[in-house]
Image: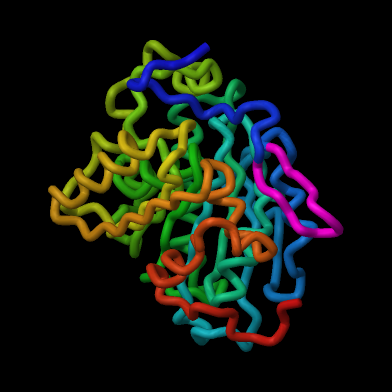
Amino acid sequence: MTLPSSALTFRLRRGAPLVSLAVAGAALLSACSPIRLLDRLVPTDTYQFQGGIAYGPAPRQRLDVYQPLPSAQPAADARPLVVFFFGGTWTSGDRASYRFMGEALAARGAVVVVPDYGLSPGFTYPVFVQDSARAVKWALDNAAQWGADPRQVYVMGHSSGGYNAAMVALDDRWLGELGASPKQLAGWIGLAGPYDFLPIGDPQAQAAFNWPGTPRDSQPLSHVTPAAPRALLLAAAKDDLVYPDRNTGRMAAALRAAGVPVQVRLFDNLSHVTLVGAFARPLQWLGGPVLPPVVDFLGLASVPSHKGAR
């Protein structure tokens, strides 16, 4: 079924190409292959890791922390902390599959937190936003303990995870419920995030948002104000899963109209999936590069500042 241009689909098409790897020949990963395959190819000696930390009582309220090596720049207590939310149409995904993202940023000096969160159909909106806010509150409260600057906490996400990041950064209800505020964030980073997607056409997203009973204020675009944190928005220019004109373009325009600093980068040679895959060290040559604008936005070194990388 072809959706009209006013609707969005988040589901990856079975058999759609993900990326070609020149490793022992040309091995093809498809969109239906687990993205965790990338983790087998990234270094394990460029960061320190602690996993399975509880940020709440529920089984899915667990997170992993990636810390820079002691020799990495910037110095401890001056490092940014990035909370990264994975995508998957709010129905799939797990933190263990995104070690490549933790490595990419921790190797350059950021403390990285990758949480799980409640997924549909077991949980629907707003539970996954509430879980995301709870993880961010944990990060705000514990940043110094992990060697990060509490004044430099960022939220970041890809696809539906970009939605989670946007809602936490823009809609003060969620952190407000926990005694915190988006004003405590140093910024937010959206990778091909859906920010304005009513009506909902995809069956998985419909279930996640209880369509057609989805409230209008579930849309991040509805919550842009002059108080919003500064933003970096990245997208594939020809993304046909989460349309960049409607989502990244409209969000950037709304932020600018509100006087909020925003940077936008569109990539002609990346897809919805390879946009995030290109953060993996073996794939950083793909169509981007995507890492430099993120590193610059976070105020980090452009290359790893240690000798541990393989």
The residue most toward the right is: 24
Q: Residue at coordinates 50% horizontally, 50% vertically from top-left? A: 269
- Report the magenta residues as a range: 18-30
Q: How many marks?
A: 0
Vertical position of residue 23 compared to residue 106: above or below: above
Image quadrant assignment for residue 149: bottom left
Secondary structure of the magenta portion, mostly?
A: strand
Q: What is the x, y in percent for residue 72?
A: 59, 84
From the viewer's perspective, tell me whether residue 287 is left or right of residue 32.
left
- Lateral position of residue 267 relative to residue 252, left or right: right
Q: How is the image coloured?
A: rainbow
28 is within the stretch colored magenta: yes
Placement of 61 over or under 187, stated as above or below: above
Task: Please say whether residue 172 is visible from this viewpoint.
Answer: no
Taking 243 as reference, is 155 above or below it? below
Question: Is residue 49 visible from the viewing direction of this image?
Answer: yes
* Residue displayed at 63% across by 38% down: 58
Tell me residue 154's x, y (percent): 42, 61
Q: Position of residue 96 (x, y in %)?
A: 71, 50
Q: Residue at x 44, y 64 (%)?
A: 294
Q: Quadrant of residue 219?
A: top left
Residue at screen point 49% across, 80% down: 301
- The foreground one among 169 and 221 is 221
Location of residue 92 by image quarter: top right
Which part of the image, by quadrant, shows the C terminus?
A: bottom right
User: Is-magenta flag for residue 43?
Assistant: no
